[in-house]
Amino acid sequence: MQIHRAGRLSRRDSYEIIEAETGEEGVRLAQERHPSLVLMDIRLPGIDGIEALGRLRAEPATRGIPIMAMTASEDRQRITDAGFDAYQSKPIKVKDFVAAVERLLEHPGK
């Protein structure tokens, strides 16, 4: 697990980043750390991002954490139907990404 301070995404905020290498590790870390936001790749080693999302949504302690899908996948409908709170396609457009992160942190669940 790597924990470090991220660079500033906006002029007023900085974020602590907790990274996971697999879907299972990401679920475990979210359950242990209760982050304000999860950025979830869809294609992960082990369980994929959609399965990880389902596991987090099934647990009362992690159900309300906003989760943004981050993927190069073209299957946006499948990702949206899975129940992610937001979606960012790769390559990331920084301005759109920062706006989505700020929106999810200010208004979780919207």
Image (cartoon, rainbow, N blue to C red):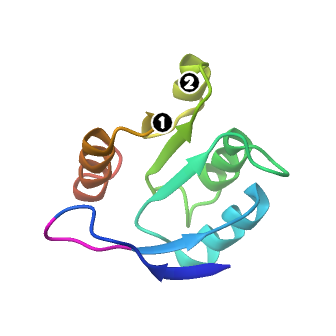
- Give the image quarter of residue 100: top left
Question: Mark 1 near mark 2, Cβ–Cβ under 8 Å?
Answer: no
Quadrant occupied by the C terminus: top left
* Front position in the image: 99 or 81: 99
Q: Left or right: where does residue 87 sit relative to residue 19?
A: left
Q: State which region is magenta.
A: 11-15
| Residue 94 percent coordinates (x, y) | 31, 45
Residue in the image at 51% along x and 26% along y: 80
Which numbered tag is attached to residue 63?
none
| Residue 51 percent coordinates (x, y) | 74, 43
Foreground mark, 1 or 2?
Answer: 1
Q: Principal SS element in the magenta part?
A: loop
Marks 1 and 2 sit apart, C-alpha to C-alpha, by: 21 Å
Residue in the image at 50% along x and 38% along y: 84
In the image, residue 7 sits, relative to residue 47, either above or below, namely: below
What is the crowding at mark 1: few (fewer than 14 residues within 10 Å), some, or many (at least 20)? Answer: few
Determine if the magenta segment contains residue 12.
yes
In the image, residue 109 sits, relative to residue 30, either above or below, namely: above
What is the crowding at mark 2: few (fewer than 14 residues within 10 Å), some, or many (at least 20)? Answer: few
Q: Which amino acid, mark 1? A: Pro
Residue found at the very far left of the displayed protein:
11
Q: Left or right: where does residue 14 sit relative to residue 5?
A: left
- Give the image quarter of residue 1: bottom right
* Front position in the image: 42 or 37: 42
Residue in the image at 72% along x and 41% along y: 43
Residue with the mark numbered 1: 91
Which numbered tag is attached to residue 81?
2
| Residue 74 percent coordinates (x, y) | 59, 19
Instruction: Label 1, secondary structure: give it.
Output: loop
